[in-house]
Amino acid sequence: MAAGSPSLSTPKPAATPGAFAPIPGGALATSARLSLAWFALAFVWLAVGAILLVLNSATLAQPHAHPATVGLTHAWVLGFLCSATFGAVYQLLPVAIGLPLASSAAAWVHLALHGAAVLAIVPAFFAGRYEGVALGGLLAAGGVALFAGNIGLTVMFAPRRDAVAWAFAFSASWLLVTVSVGALAAAHRRWSFLPADSLALLRAHAHLGVVGFFLTLLQGVTFRLVPMFTLAEVSHWPRIGHGLAATQIGLLGLAPSLVGQWPVLQILFALVLAAGVTISGAELIATLRTRRKRVLETGILAFVVGAGTFGLATALGLVLTAAPSANHGLSLRGALVFGLLAIFGGLVTMVGGMLCKIVPFLVWMSVYGPRVGRQPVPLAAHLPSARLERLWWWLHVLSVVVLLLGAGLGRELLLALGAVLVLAATGVFLANQVRVMKHLWRPQTVAAPTPAPFNLSRKSA
């Protein structure tokens, strides 16, 4: 690779437990197209989600079990966040454990099933057709079963299994439980055959997805991405395992206590879960203190700020669990603020920042990697626009602030304004991603440097 363009495909070995291991046969480079296909699907749903948010901003003030609210949430979480995260996992897992995926073919089948599932689930929610949601849930479950099996086999045959590798395996397992519970909840909403409350099932489903899949995965991936892009070192590897273990124990108790509506157990296990988030956050801060790149680029800044915001959402969730409001309207606004803080402030911010860093490298590897040494190539860092990244960042931050104010104050006008700002931020973000991905079909030609003329009349000393 050209100087100044670090590659995900050629990690440098190190003596620390978190060192990257080389991957036999260049498997990472050959899987770039797979991840880029997932990212393309994610970008489509990012645009759809932003448009739906503008058209349905008033429904945010409705109870979170409202079909349109749940449909909007699935457009963002299942359509955008999950698609982008699947693409990242299929690319980062081989880097993390030094072994190719067990099956790239299964990952492509997963892409097809997932795309069909989201296309079935989101419109079905808006139409209130829960049998369609259940059918889409079965398609999603089939795809996630392939995903979980693929991740599990890859981790099983890894030469080493540290806390980061286990985070991949645990998150895939939780996701399989999440989609199964979601399909079951949709079927129960339609036919009422379970001795459980539909809203309780929905809350358990949401926590299984956000905490079980996203948070568990981030508790591992963070300690690969941040050291890679900031030239930092993990401060205390056992602390990563401790944070991960606390989160798993907390969710194991919190999910059934939400279904059973047992307040004391909810508080107890929420505290354990919050302890896990705190431990992981402390290690992230310690890792950042060791970085050699003092100025954080926009993508990494977004990732780190999103992680901090997710921590704030965890604290708010703990408060809502321990001290539920007797005021129904205040309780609804608190739940809405919690959801917006976790999804838009935390997950969307972190995933957006991650994509700002990963997509240019994957495009560079696909297009220019094979040309290195044969012709001049651009640097990976020059593919995106730094100005567009900064503009996206500030628009996104502003949109989250306005959405949170609208949710907290119960003002539909502020929610509508926040939705418009989300659409603007999304437009800028996607324009930058298109700028990067157009290199796939229109590679850039870089002029070779002109050699300095040799002066024959120059006398030697």
Image (cartoon, rainbow, N blue to C red):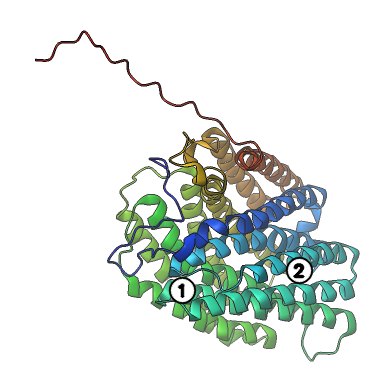
Residue 233 position, x and y percent, is 32, 59
Quarter occupied by the N terminus: top left
Work out whether mark 2 precedes mark 1 in sequence or the reverse, and give the earlier one. 2
- Residue drawn at x 55%, y 30% as measured from the top left: 445
Q: How many marks can you see?
A: 2
- Residue drawn at x 42%, y 75% as measured from the top left: 163
Local crowd at mark 1 within 10 Å, few (<14), some, or many (≥20)?
Answer: many
Between the C-alphas of marks 2 and 1, the distance is: 25 Å
Q: In the shown orientation, is residue 110 left or right of residue 185?
A: left
Residue 443 position, x and y percent, is 60, 36
- Residue drawn at x 45%, y 27% as measured from the top left: 448
Amino acid type shown at disc 1: Ala
Q: In the shown orientation, is residue 453 left or right of residue 305?
A: left
Amino acid type shown at disc 2: Leu
**Residue at the limit of the structure toward the bottom, as seen here:** 195
Q: Is residue 67 above or below residue 378?
A: below
Q: Is residue 250 above or below residue 341?
A: below
Q: Is residue 63 above or below residue 322?
A: above
Residue linked to disc 2 = 113
Local crowd at mark 2 within 10 Å, few (<14), some, or many (≥20)?
Answer: many
Circle on res. 165: 1
